[in-house]
């Protein structure tokens, strides 16, 4: 793997080639890991709110989860907050998921040979999967805030995955993760924003290497779907 690139935002997703990791730590792809840990049947990422509503009409026992500007989309069952979702509500259900950054990366990565998602909660599993595949090209796409502004948490996740791929020890992961509290994660500690960005979400999203699985993005006649793949 001599060609490992870190790319940025929606434009970076459009440029991604080879095995592509779409990274969204706060909160899309952390949430999807927690959803699969809650035994959802399947997750279907979509780019637009309109697609989400259309899919719900096609798929029985489906639940709409998503946000725009951090806020739950009107008419959706849940926002993008992992701490707000209970297993009893989603187990066995198909999740239709749309977000401002993460799912936009998926639909824009049109030149990727393979797409997986990435976050701190499964970063090591992502790296191990890539090593097992030995692709010629790897693109690590940091989706940032709404796909248009860089976000420190995504940059950290990409750097951490890249260090594992290159066999380098990432000795300061703990302090760098803690640093996100005041440099990238401030909104989770703003009392006026707790209904949108609850503090508990911050801690759920920075629990690095919690899950020993990756999420692969595939496509069928209905559209994209995200599949859990154990490492």
Image (tube, rainbow, N blue to C red):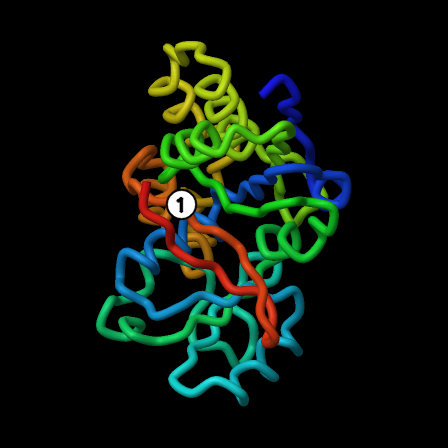
Q: Quadrant of the N terminus?
A: top right
Q: Residue at x 61, y 36 (%)?
A: 142
Q: How far from the left and from the top, in percent, is residue 8?
A: 69, 35
Q: Is residue 122 left or right of residue 150?
A: left
Q: How far from the left and from the top, in percent, is residue 152?
A: 55, 30
Q: Relative to 157, does residue 55 appear above or below in the rendering? A: below
Residue found at the very far left of the displayed protein: 88
* In the foreground, 83 or 59: 59
- Neighbourhood count class around disc 1 (C-alpha, 10 Å): few under 14, some 14–19, many 20 upward: many
Q: Quadrant of residue 103?
A: bottom right
Q: Residue at x 29, y 40 (%)?
A: 212
Q: Residue at x 32, y 34 (%)?
A: 209
Tell how many labels: 1
Q: Quadrant of the C terminus?
A: top left
Q: Is residue 198 left or right of residue 48?
A: left
Q: Relative to 191, does residue 173 appear above or below in the rendering? A: above
Q: SS of the residue at dot 1?
A: strand
Q: Residue at x 41, y 13 (%)?
A: 170
Q: Quadrant of residue 119?
A: top left
Q: Relative to 180, does residue 97 appear above or below in the rendering? A: below
* In the foreground, 155 or 182: 155
Q: How far from the left and from the top, in percent, is residue 72?
A: 51, 68
* In the foreground, 215 or 79: 215
Q: How far from the left and from the top, in percent, is residue 133?
A: 49, 34
Q: Which residue is mark 1?
A: 214
């Amino acid at each position: 793997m001599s060609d490992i690139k870190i790319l940025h935002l929606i434009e970076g997703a459009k440029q991604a080639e080879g095995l592509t990791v779409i990274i969204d730590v706060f909160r899309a792809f952390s949430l999807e890991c927690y959803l699969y840990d809650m035994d959802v049947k399947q997750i279907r990422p979509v780019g637009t709110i309109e697609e989400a509503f259309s899919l719900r009409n096609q798929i029985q026992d489906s639940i709409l989860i998503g946000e725009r500007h951090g806020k739950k989309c009107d008419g959706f069952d849940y926002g993008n907050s992992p701490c707000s979702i209970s297993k009893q509500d989603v187990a066995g259900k198909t999740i239709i998921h749309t977000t401002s950054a993460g799912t936009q990366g998926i639909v824009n990565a049109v030149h990727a040979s393979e797409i997986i998602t990435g976050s701190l909660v499964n970063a090591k599993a992502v790296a191990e999967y890539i090593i097992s595949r030995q692709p010629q090209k790897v693109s690590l796409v940091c989706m940032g805030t709404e796909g248009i502004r860089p976000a420190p948490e995504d940059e950290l996740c990409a750097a951490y995955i890249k260090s594992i791929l290159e066999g380098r020890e990432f000795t300061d992961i703990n302090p760098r993760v803690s640093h996100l509290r005041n440099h990238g994660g401030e909104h989770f500690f703003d009392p006026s924003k707790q209904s949108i960005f609850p503090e508990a979400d911050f801690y759920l999203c920075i629990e690095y290497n919690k899950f020993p699985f990756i999420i692969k993005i595939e496509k069928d006649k209905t559209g994209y779907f995200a599949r859990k793949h154990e490492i």
